[in-house]
Image (cartoon, grey):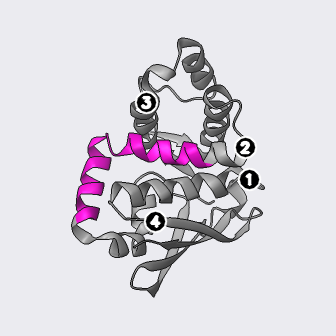
Amino acid sequence: MSAEPIVFSSAVEALQKSFGARLTPELKVKLRSIGVDVERPPAAVPLAAWLEVIELLGAALLPDTPAAERNRLLGREYIRGFVQTALGFATVSMAKLMGTKRTMLRMGRNFRTSTNYIDTDAKELGDKEVEIHTRIAAGMEERVPKNVSSIVQYRRGVLEQTLEELGAKNAKVDVLAHDLGNLSVSFRVSWE
């Protein structure tokens, strides 16, 4: 039996830090109904519930924004909240010491601070350019919801905001390819 794909409590804490007062009592009730209590984060949230959280927050907080843009903005907002957590502050502080390129080449480790289901490969394309490929970890493929289009732009937003937090200038994140069947996405990340 394969492990359950989960998102760790640090991700829920990041949402609470990021969205704060925008998490109305009604929205908190809806989040609790899918198993996510932002005031008392569980140790882990099943991936299926986390994907519902993304959809719920997007619909509630960015209702007039097209879906792709909404998911990208939620990914960025997630990182803004993550850097306000103890784990996020330590992660970004260390990343700044390592530099942008080294951090991008090690994004798999960064993703693993919040999840157990993402495997990542990265390769250097140039001095300030990296290709990052994310996919579902081996053994979890059958336990992950399929055809979740939100994940492509959400991960793009995560990478964009990570670059901004690192102080990268003129950063750009392009989606090179994606396969919603196994939630794999390849990105080209560049900066000046």
Mark 4 or mark 1, which has the lower sequence index?
1
* Residue at mark 2 to residue at mark 1: CA–CA distance: 9 Å
What residue is shown with label 1? 149
**Three-letter code for the amino acid on which mark 4 is drawn:** Ala
What residue is shown with label 2? 67
Where disc 4 sits, the SS reads loop
What residue is shown with label 4? 171
Tell me where residue 42 sits by quadrant: top left
Span highlighted in magenta in the image: 72-96
Residue located 26% across and 63% down the image: 96
**Three-letter code for the amino acid on which mark 2 is drawn:** Ala
**Three-letter code for the amino acid on which mark 3 is drawn:** Gln
What residue is shown with label 3? 16
* Residue at mark 2 to residue at mark 3: CA–CA distance: 22 Å
- Magenta span: chief secondary structure: helix
* Residue at mark 4 to residue at mark 1: CA–CA distance: 23 Å
Q: Residues within 10 Å of mark 4 (few under 14, many from 20)?
A: some
Q: Residues within 10 Å of mark 1 (few under 14, many from 20)?
A: some
Mark 3 or mark 1, which has the lower sequence index?
3
Q: Are marks 2 and 1 in contact (CB under 8 Å)?
A: yes
Mark 2 or mark 1, which has the lower sequence index?
2
The answer to whether 22 appears left or right of 59 in the picture is: left
* Residue at mark 3 to residue at mark 4: CA–CA distance: 27 Å
The answer to whether 121 appears left or right of 180 in the picture is: left
Front tag of 3 and 4? 4
Mark 2 or mark 3, which has the lower sequence index?
3
Front tag of 4 and 1? 4
Mark 2 or mark 4, which has the lower sequence index?
2
Name the quarter where the N terminus is drawn: bottom right
* Residue at mark 3 to residue at mark 1: CA–CA distance: 24 Å
